[in-house]
Image: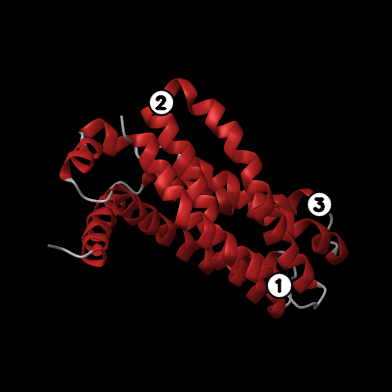
Amino acid sequence: MRTLTQLLWQQMRREWTLQIRQKKSWVNSLLFFAMILLFFPMTIPADPQLDRIIVPGLVWVALLLANLLAAERLFQVDYDEGAIELWLVSGQPLPVMICAKVFVHWGLTLVPLLGLIPIVALLFHMPVYAALALAESLLCGTLPIILLSALAAAYSTVLPQKGVLMGLVVLPLLLPILILGAATTTAAMATLPVSAYLAYLAALSCLSLATIPVAIAAVMRP
């Protein structure tokens, strides 16, 4: 019998192949994120003090909107093709299958975002310390955003009539992550310590990983 680690790894390889082939959604979300950050500086004066106030919140709101765009159809193809029904009858732990999909989606989203950080730092006159803090905050704080978005996507896929309502429920849960993420970058731009903010973001990631896949599995079960 396969261990949970082997099952997770096998499912992640499958999800990697599928999401690379169906790259339209996450590529579009990354382009959307980049467009917000590239076009926004054109609408405001070139003022480093203004950048210090605006940039932290802008980056995290752009990240949230881009992720919601990408996660909208996260489970739709599997649902339409009957893959979710196969998961249900296979006897395998459904949260593990969900974690595999979310991890691959997280990796495909996070790595390009980290690659864009030097460009963001140049556009908004961010010091190196602040850019590194932004990268660390994205590493610690993007997983709960993706998991909560996946929960809303699962509701929209399995229960279309309740999808909008679930989206409204999920959005308030995202606020602490946005606040902590923006506060991390704000503190770094003021050359203040950021370890406490990162610890809170990491704790939220662990809590989300322990609970949300189980909630998504409950949504998918009839």
Q: Give amino acid for label 2.
A: Leu
How would you rate the neighbour count of disc 3 (Cα within 10 Å): few for under 14, some for 14-19, many for 20 or more? few
Residue named by callout 2: 159
* Residue 53 drawn at (x, y percent): 83, 59
N-terminal of the two: label 1 or label 2?
Answer: 2
Nearest the viewer among 50 and 148 is 148
Residue named by callout 3: 44
Q: Give amino acid for label 1.
A: Ala
Marks 3, 1: nearer the viewer? 1
Marks 2, 3: nearer the viewer? 2
Determine whether, in the image, residue 66 is placed left or right of residue 36: left
Label 1 to label 2, Cα distance in Å?
A: 38 Å
Q: Furthest residue to the left? A: 1
Residue 221 seen by the camera: yes
Residue named by callout 1: 196
Q: Give amino acid for label 3.
A: Ile
Label 2 to label 3, Cα distance in Å?
A: 42 Å
Residue 35 seen by the camera: no
Q: What residue sits 81% from the left and 51% below the top? A: 44
Q: Marks 2 and 1: in contact by CB < 8 Å? A: no
Q: What residue sits 50% from the left and 58% below the top? A: 143
Secondary structure, mark 3, is: loop
Nearest the viewer among 26 and 35 is 26
